[in-house]
Amino acid sequence: MSGEVTVVVGVQWGDEGKGRIVDVLANDADVIARFGGGNNAGHTLVVEGRKVVLRSVPSGVFHAPKPLLIGAGVVIDLANFVQELDELAAIGIDISRIKLDERAHLTLPYHVALDRLGEQSRGKAAIGTTGRGIGPSYVDKVARVGVRVGDLRHPERLAERVRAAVAYHEQRLVDGGVSIDPDRIVDELAALSPRILPHLIDGVELVQDVLARGGRVLAEGAQAAMLDVGFGTYPYVTSSHTVAGGACIGLGVGPTQVGEVIGVTKAYCTRVGGGPFPSELHDEIGERIRERGNEYGTNTGRPRRCGWFDAVAARFACRLNGVGRLVVTKLDVLSGLDRVGVVTSYVRDGRAVGVDQIGDDGVTPEITWFPGWSEDVRTARRIQDLPETARAYVQFLEQVTDTPVGWISVGAERSALIELT
Ligand code: IMP
């Protein structure tokens, strides 16, 4: 009997609350794995009064005593990772179950510098990256000048690769007034090495052994479909494949091994950084959503741009990912609004256009309005507990995305979840 992979992905522009559903599904999983992105992701948890920010470790770390894998498709900043391990150990987490695929690529100081230089050179068209060196790390992977975590096992090879990569980027760094000493990077990596080596494994073996035994792999996505390097609002995207297919590439599983894909969406929409966001609210309603929803970047503290639910983008993302069920998060944040909008089409010269034209000149969003609800829904635990108007709103989201809603989250705490059968 073979097991299967369940993939959890965001279907908007990130920060949908993927950790909420990982929390629900983690108990049935035999391994929880991150398949892409790096420390551009952020997930804040408060455990016994201590704030812990997860960046590279899967959010499943708090939910079940299962192995946690940082997959081959992830790029990792080891100094940051060690700090994360220390923070987790300090609150009593058994960090020995955190495993790192040796194929994962390193994010090194020159990647961070190149990220900054890239943004500077883009000027007004800056992407608004998280500044963590994610894009340049993936570029190096594809350019075949990357350094992998497994290179730590071979100090000479590691030193050679770091030196070669710095030489490869030298002109750009010099032009940008950045001085990078490769030997210092090598020394820093050597100092971190004893902390990293015990976590290194062949991640493919771990995942495939679980599947061969009939077990379940929970693949936790980072960022979201509309930030996917291939299908998102390019070039205002991250540099990895954030869609469900990225789980295959980032973990080493075949498409036939994926069972279900679960898509996570907020009841409204947010985006951090630059790029088109047609349903953005520049008024006091946007401000209200930001405050009520605490829409500030976990990692960078940047205020998130807030807007109405974008059904065109979400429907596209559900198809792109093959989403079987949706999780709608933060429904409670919309309480108290007179009316709630949903972008139901994009129009140019009176004709509907596709999602690929988001942000093009002359393309405007069309909004469908719904009556709001005044009730506080944070205590709702069954669909019947929601006001009629909130229920109608969720039903509409199902209809426009053509995807059933499996869960609705109505508050920050674990129990604030409605499961639909
Ligand atoms: P990068 O991933 O740092 O290169 O940033 C590229 C784009 O993705 C920027 O618009 C970032 O704000 C966005 N981004 C990256 N990670 C996240 C995330 O975890 N949540 C929301 N947006 C993100």
Image (spheres, grey):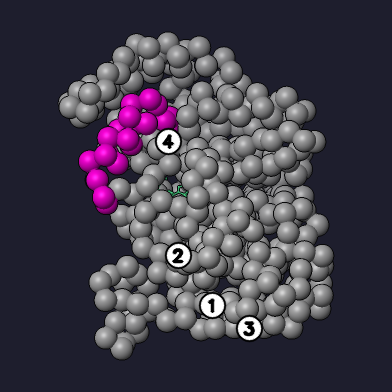
Nearest to N terminus: mark 1 or mark 3: 1
Q: Which residue lies furthest to the front in this view?
A: 284
**Quadrant in the picture for the N terminus:** bottom right
- Magenta span contains residue 297: no
Determine which of the numbered discs, if any, sits on residue 282 in the image: 2
* Label placed on residue 341: 1
Give the residue type at disc 3.
Pro
Of the pair 22 and 119, the residue shown nearer to us: 119
237 relative to 156, above or below: below
Q: Mark 1 to mark 4: distance in Å?
A: 34 Å
Q: What residue type is labelled 1?
A: Gly
Quarter-of-image position of residue 92: top right
Residue lying at 51% horizontally and 23% vertically, measured from the top left: 79
User: Which of the marked residues, 4 or 2, is nearer the chain's N terminus?
Assistant: 4
The residue that label 4 is drawn on is: 132
- Helix, strand or loop under label 2: loop
Q: What residue type is labelled 2?
A: His
- Is 135 positioned to the left or the right of 249 in the image? left
For the point 72% across and 54% down, the residue is 412
**Neighbour class for label 4 at 10 Å: few (<14), some, many (≥20)?**
many
Characterize the local packing of mark 1: few (<14), some (14-19) or many (20 or more) Cα atoms within 10 angstroms.
some
| Magenta residues, dominant SS class | helix
- Asked whether residue 3 appears in the rendered view, the answer is no
Circle 2: is it few (<14), some (14-19), or many (20+) Cα within 10 Å?
A: few
Residue stretch rendered in magenta on the structure:
103-125
- Give the amino acid type for the residue marked by disc 4 in the picture: Arg
- Mark number, residue 371: 3
Give how far apart the Cα atoms at labels 3 and 2 are: 20 Å
